[in-house]
Image: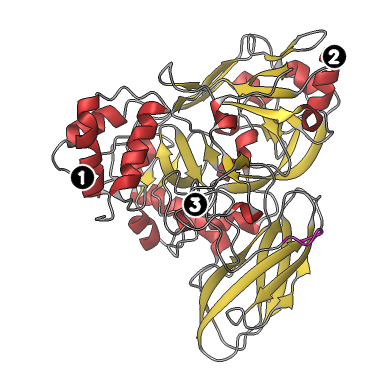
């Protein structure tokens, strides 16, 4: 009987034992999917991307998409907990860039500038002690999470389902910083930039923009901590933007400047990239080009079965608790429905504690497996404004906002 | 296997003075001036499938990004590979000589293509 909670530790110990040489070299090792599978480390059912596993500084063993810039996916077993551990939280730098790896806190400053009365240059100390501290849980999910399931396939970061995570973020409201700087009349947007830089000078700099009203809403955070600790470097140290309910592309890491602007920002990463079809469900017929696009924005509804893990063998007649997560773009999860017969019948799951409308909502269902055979377990969630999920996958050319009803196949013996 | 690579030396050099004060209490004052936090990224090497023009593809594509970007793609049609190479040049500013473009697309469509 596999127990997914014990897998990471066991796999880790086995890796150390099997690869003593690698362990002696440093805290980094790399493992093929096949070797990892042989060691029972994680499923190859396709829930995650295929790997290999790698270990990066301040991170546990994660699934490698790319090493330069780093893109690392979180294995399924870490979603069995309410909070995704910081060391297991997915990593997504990109945009053909050079990422910041060294910070002198004596000189690092976050600048609040542009169309303001008093431009600010804030140290990390200022962020941690100079303004009211706010903490809440929120899901960060990459726009392209689950891209590998698009059919026909689309090029890009070929994520499985692990480019998401739920953390408790602590920091300062962006609104408080903007008000301290004094936003002048006529402000339209804020642009947000970090310390990452393109390799070539002609490559577009990664800059994102939020509407001024959004930036002044109480929920957008300049976070210096996740799960009560400083951000890992690969997750945005010293401070990153937290935009609850919105896709990760806006959660700019290693912040350096936030600029209030009086005209709509038309930089590449807003005007050309991270755009979705302006159609229902951001979907177009597979293989076609949308007529009109808008910047990607709010998360769609998603839900997952985490336990039992894909491919589990369950004894018949023995009660088992199905367990998983659901989340949406901030309206809150109203209902989770689970099927143990491939979608023929559905029943309502019991929702776990509510940690806020931007957090993972855990759910459980008790199930007594009947006769032996293969069972398809399915889950779908509905939020408080009636948005849900579909069996028909959506499609768009960039592979964004996948939210099909997910399933897990298990064997009853 | 293609991804098999050489391990790079890695160190996490986190200035102890900085993090020591933070490990348990996010509300505590920040570290003294002059402290630095740094990590060293692993240095990985990947190789593409052998074939005509593989050296040029490896050299030109890895200027800006890891070859894993190619290795992780699903099989893509020649048209999609051509569009990707075009995007690298005209959107991201890759310095790929015009007379190499056809060779690169050929290579990618041959080794990482759908056969269409």
- Magenta residues span A383-387
Residue B104 to residue A394: above or below:
above
Residue A288 to residue B55: above or below:
below
Q: How many marks?
A: 3
At x 16%, y 43%, the residue is: B50
Q: Marks 3/2: CA distance? A: 41 Å
| A214 in the magenta segment | no
Could you say which is closer to the camera, residue A98 or residue A52? A98
Q: Marks 3/1: CA distance? A: 24 Å
Determine crowd level at label 3: few under 14, some 14-19, many 20+ residues with C-alpha closer than 10 A: many
Q: Main secondary structure of the magenta part?
A: loop
Residue A263, picture quadrant: top right
Q: Is residue B66 left or right of residue A338?
A: left
Residue A247, picture quadrant: top right
Residue A291 visible? The answer is: yes
At x 71%, y 30%, the residue is: A210
Q: Residue furthest bottom?
A: A371
Which chain letter goes with mark 3? A
Q: Is residue A400 left or right of residue A11?
A: right
Could you say which is closer to the camera, residue A349 or residue B60? B60
Instruction: Name the residue tied to disc 2.
Output: A182
Residue B27 visible? The answer is: no
Badge 3 and badge 1 both on one subunit: no
Instruction: Name the residue tied to disc 1.
Output: B49
Which chain letter goes with mark 1? B
Determine which of the numbered discs, if any, sits on residue A147 in the image.
Answer: 3
Q: Is residue A216 left or right of residue A314?
A: right
Q: Where residue B47 sits in the image (x, y, percent)?
A: 24, 39
Q: Where residue A242 sits in the image (x, y, percent)?
A: 70, 35
């Amino acid at each position: 009987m596999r127990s997914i909670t014990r897998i990471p530790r066991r796999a880790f110990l086995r890796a150390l034992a099997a690869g003593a040489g690698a362990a002696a070299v440093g805290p980094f090792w790399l493992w093929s999917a096949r070797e990892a599978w042989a060691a029972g480390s994680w499923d190859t059912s396709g829930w995650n991307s295929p790997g290999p596993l790698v270990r990066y500084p301040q991170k546990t063993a994660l699934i490698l998409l790319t090493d330069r810039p780093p893109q690392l996916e979180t294995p399924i077993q870490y979603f069995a907990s309410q909070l995704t551990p910081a060391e297991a939280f997915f990593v997504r730098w990109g945009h053909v860039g050079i990422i910041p790896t060294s910070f002198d806190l004596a000189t690092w400053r976050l600048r609040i500038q542009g169309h303001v009365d008093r431009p600010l240059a804030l140290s990390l100390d200022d962020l941690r002690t100079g303004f009211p501290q706010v903490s809440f849980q929120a899901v960060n999910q990459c726009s392209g999470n689950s891209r590998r399931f698009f059919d026909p396939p689309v090029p890009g970061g070929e994520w499985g389902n692990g480019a998401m995570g739920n953390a408790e973020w602590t920091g300062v409201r962006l609104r408080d910083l903007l008000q301290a700087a004094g936003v002048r009349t006529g402000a339209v947007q804020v642009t947000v930039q970090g310390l990452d830089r393109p390799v070539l000078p002609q490559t577009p700099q990664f800059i994102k923009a939020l509407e001024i009203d959004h930036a002044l809403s109480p929920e957008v955070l300049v976070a210096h901590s996740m799960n009560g600790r400083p951000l890992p470097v690969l997750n945005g140290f010293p401070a990153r933007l937290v935009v609850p309910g919105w896709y990760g592309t806006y959660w700019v890491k290693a912040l350096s400047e936030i600029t209030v602007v009086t005209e709509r920002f038309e930089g590449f990463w807003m005007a050309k990239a991270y755009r979705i079809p302006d159609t229902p469900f951001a979907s177009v017929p597979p293989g076609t080009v949308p007529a009109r696009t808008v910047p990607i924005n709010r998360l769609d509804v998603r839900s997952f079965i985490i336990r039992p893990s894909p491919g589990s063998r369950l004894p018949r007649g023995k009660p088992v608790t199905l367990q998983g997560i659901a989340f949406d773009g901030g309206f809150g999860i109203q209902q989770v429905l689970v099927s143990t017969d491939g979608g023929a019948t559905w029943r309502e799951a019991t929702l776990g504690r509510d940690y806020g409308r931007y957090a993972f909502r855990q759910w459980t269902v008790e199930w007594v497996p009947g006769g032996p055979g293969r069972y398809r377990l399915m889950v779908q969630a509905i939020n408080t404004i009636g948005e849900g999920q579909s069996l028909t996958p959506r499609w768009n050319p960039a592979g964004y906002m996948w939210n099909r009803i997910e399933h897990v196949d298990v064997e009853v013996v | 296997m293609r991804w098999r690579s050489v391990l790079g030396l890695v160190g996490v050099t986190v200035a102890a003075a900085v993090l020591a004060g933070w490990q348990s209490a996010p509300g505590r004052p920040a570290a003294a001036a002059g402290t630095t936090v740094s990590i060293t990224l692993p240095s990985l090497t990947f190789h593409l499938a052998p074939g005509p023009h593989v050296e040029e593809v490896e050299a030109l594509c890895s200027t800006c990004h890891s070859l894993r970007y190619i290795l992780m793609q699903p099989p893509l049609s020649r048209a999609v590979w051509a569009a990707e190479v075009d995007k690298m040049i005209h959107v991201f500013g890759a310095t790929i000589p015009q007379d190499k473009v056809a060779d690169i697309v050929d290579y990618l469509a041959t080794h990482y293509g759908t056969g269409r």
